[in-house]
Amino acid sequence: VSMACGGEATILLYENGTWAFTTGLPKNLHNKLNGRQKTLPSPVYVSMGSLDRFYIKFADGKSVFVGCDEMLEELQSTSRMVKTIAFGGDWDSYFIVYTDGWWKCVGFIPSALRDLIDRRKSKADLSCVSIGPAGEYFMSARNGRIWWGGMSDDNLAIASEQRNSIKFMDFGDNGAFFARYS
């Protein structure tokens, strides 16, 4: 269902309601999942960033996150449903994509991603944005079009091998990245 990289940690949420994760998860996220009762709603979406920030949504629509106050205000003030959340390079930066394609970004967002958004005239047709700690980014639109960049030459070459089938990318520390493709 969902996967996320953050720092050196990775978490995977599976369709059957189970999950797996590596060491290094933010403590509050680990506590939400470790020993979670099977009677409680399963997690269906997760995102992680640096500085122990995370967002997790459960099957009942409830969510928990650690992030800046402005993000809290944004999430509480809108009736839109969150599709994806990416955390930028500092505590106060984030990029939220809603299920209707609208989005909001605040703070440090990679300049190449901002340029891409500007070239697209800030269209409200997004389905996903993810951001890495060193300026990496992935963006997809609702029509299936995808963009990525800010990666090392080696990682760009790896991603380019699957350019026509990539569905999602996320980024961790030290140039690590994950790509889902079909």
Image (cartoon, rainbow, N blue to C red):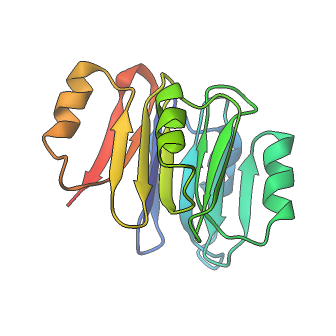
Residue 129 appears in view: yes
**Quarter of the figure with the C terminus:** bottom left
Q: At x 39% / y 26%, what residue is drawn? A: 150
Q: Is residue 143 left or right of residue 83?
A: left
Which residue is the extreme one toward the left?
161
Residue 102: percent from the left, percent from the top? 62, 62
Q: Is residue 98 left or right of residue 140?
A: right
Pick the residue in front: 181 or 137. 137
Pick the residue in front: 93 or 125. 125
**Quarter of the figure with the N terminus:** bottom left
What number of labels is visible? 0
Residue 137: percent from the left, percent from the top? 44, 36
Residue 12 appears in view: no
Asked if residue 59 is positioned above or below residue 47 in the image, the reply reads below
Asked if residue 152 is positioned above or below residue 144 in the image, the reply reads above
Residue 110: percent from the left, percent from the top? 53, 28
Q: At x 57% / y 39%, what residue is drawn? A: 25
Q: Is residue 166 left or right of residue 98?
A: left
Q: At x 46% / y 29%, what residue is drawn? A: 112
Residue 58: percent from the left, percent from the top? 63, 69
Q: Quadrant of residue 138?
A: top left
Q: At x 58% / y 75%, what residue is drawn? A: 38
